[in-house]
């Protein structure tokens, strides 16, 4: 009875995570395996990729010289460079080769030797200048014999006079004082100088050349429109312009002889008529020797005319030395003999 009345026992529950197939891999292990594979793959992908741009092809590097020309730029490779310039693509190679090989346009002159030209000009600055290139260029224009932007004067010699002093040649420069002392005695010294200068100019013709330099603290050459510091042809038109220039001249300021004389010598004239009433400042012995050397090189004769208020010429005038050293004549004039209209009475003192 005990065996028949006992309640039947139930079957035991299966253990957790039991697989339906005893021969397969558990699900949790499969999940871990898949995650490990995914992470490993992702890590390998990031490791292969590098930061930055892709590697460029190595290119040789050289130095090219570029010469700017009016219509193009010309490229030249320095001969001592061992590497050639790599140019991107065949089109650029062809362009550079064409530019390098292209001939300059017709009529294009070779580049000037500016360094040599500027060195030559800077070596001879104008008197009283600071040696700048602007002064040097102006001086070079003046020193070329025969340079005349307003016409071509000839070279036929003639003789002209200033206060009885005769000069013979085809190129004449008048260097006249216009400092304040020329206003003395009612302005008669300046008026007489201008009157006599115009008389001399009227004797010149188109076969002669001239220049006028009035000076005080600094020289002031006659510059018609379109000309520089150069000799001018003795045409009627130019002489008419010169006459207006002379008549309008006024006297003021101090006196500086040397710069005016040296400016005249740069023009390489045959004759210089130098006129002043200033014994002070004197030209020193060094200045006189410098002037003599320049005059000798240019083949220039310097005549000196001195104004004063004494009855006779001074015995120690530097103007006497200036004329004697440069083959010229010296004349002394008493300004008291000048008339108000600029005329003078009597013969100049010797």
Image (cartoon, rainbow, N blue to C red):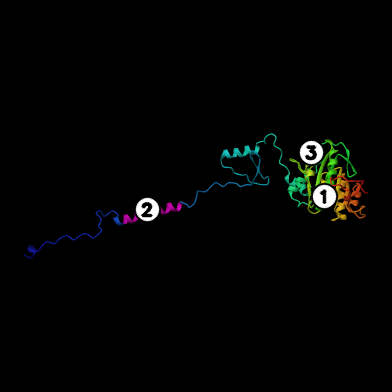
- Nearest to the observer: residue 218 or residue 70: 218
Circle 3: element type = helix
Say few, some or many: other residues with alpha carbon within 10 Å of mark 3 (under 14 / 14 to 19 / 20 or more). some
Circle 1: element type = helix
Among the two numbered marks 1 and 2 on one chain, the one whose residue lies closer to the N terminus: 2
Circle 2: element type = helix
At which x and y percent is residue 226?
74, 40
Q: Quadrant of the N terminus?
A: bottom left
Among the two numbered marks 2 and 3 on one chain, the one whose residue lies closer to the N terminus: 2
User: Are the residues flagged by discs 3 and 1 in contact, CB closer than 8 Å?
Assistant: no
At which x and y percent is residue 348?
91, 47
User: Are the residues flagged by discs 2 and 3 in contact, CB closer than 8 Å?
Assistant: no
Q: In the image, which residues are magenta?
A: 29-48
Among the two numbered marks 3 and 1 on one chain, the one whose residue lies closer to the N terminus: 1
The residue carrying mark 3 is 240
Report the Cα–Cα distance between label 3 and label 1: 23 Å
Report the Cα–Cα distance between label 1 and label 2: 116 Å
Which image quarter: residue 152?
A: top right
- What secondary structure predominates along the stretch shown in magenta? helix
The residue carrying mark 1 is 187
Q: Comparing marks 1 and 2, which lies closer to the viewer? A: 1
Side of 117 relative to 17 (left or right): right
Q: Residue furthest left?
A: 1
Say few, some or many: other residues with alpha carbon within 10 Å of mark 1 (under 14 / 14 to 19 / 20 or more). some
| Residue 265 seen in the figure | no
At which x and y percent is residue 224?
76, 41
Q: Of the numbered discs in the image, which one, if any, rests on residue 96?
A: none
Q: Of the numbered discs in the image, which one, if any, rests on residue 38?
A: 2
Q: Residue furthest bottom?
A: 2
Q: How many marks?
A: 3
């Amino acid at each position: 009875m005990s065996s028949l009345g006992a309640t039947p026992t139930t079957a035991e529950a299966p253990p957790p995570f039991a697989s339906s197939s005893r021969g397969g891999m558990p699900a949790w292990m499969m999940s871990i395996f898949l995650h490990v594979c995914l992470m490993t793959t992702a890590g390998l992908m990031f490791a292969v990729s590098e930061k930055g741009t892709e590697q460029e092809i190595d290119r040789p590097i050289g130095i090219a010289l570029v010469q700017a020309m009016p219509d193009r730029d010309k490229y030249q490779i320095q001969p001592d460079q061992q590497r050639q310039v790599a140019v991107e693509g065949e089109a650029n190679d062809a362009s550079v080769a064409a530019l390098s090989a292209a001939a300059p346009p017709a009529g294009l002159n070779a580049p000037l030797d500016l360094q040599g030209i500027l060195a030559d000009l800077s070596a001879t600055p104008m008197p009283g200048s600071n040696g700048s290139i602007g002064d040097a260029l102006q001086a070079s224009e003046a020193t070329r014999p025969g340079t005349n932007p307003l016409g071509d004067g000839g070279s036929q010699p003639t003789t002209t006079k200033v206060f009885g002093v005769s000069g013979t040649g085809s190129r004449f420069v008048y260097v006249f004082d216009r400092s304040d002392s020329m206003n003395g005695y009612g302005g008669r010294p300046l008026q007489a100088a201008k009157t006599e200068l115009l008389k001399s100019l009227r004797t010149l013709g188109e076969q002669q050349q001239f220049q006028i330099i009035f000076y005080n603290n600094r020289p002031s050459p006659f510059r018609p429109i379109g000309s520089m510091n150069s000799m001018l042809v003795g045409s009627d038109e130019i002489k008419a312009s010169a006459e207006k220039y002379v008549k309008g001249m006024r006297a003021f300021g101090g006196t500086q002889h040397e710069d005016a004389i040296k400016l005249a010598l740069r023009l390489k004239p045959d004759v210089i008529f130098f006129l002043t009433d200033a014994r002070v400042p004197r030209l020193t012995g060094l200045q006189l020797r410098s002037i003599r050397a320049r005059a000798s090189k240019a083949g220039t004769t310097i005549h000196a005319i001195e104004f004063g208020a004494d009855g006779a010429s001074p015995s120690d005038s530097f103007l006497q030395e200036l004329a004697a050293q440069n083959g010229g004549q010296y004349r002394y004039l008493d300004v008291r003999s000048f008339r108000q209209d600029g005329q003078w009475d009597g013969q100049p003192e010797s």
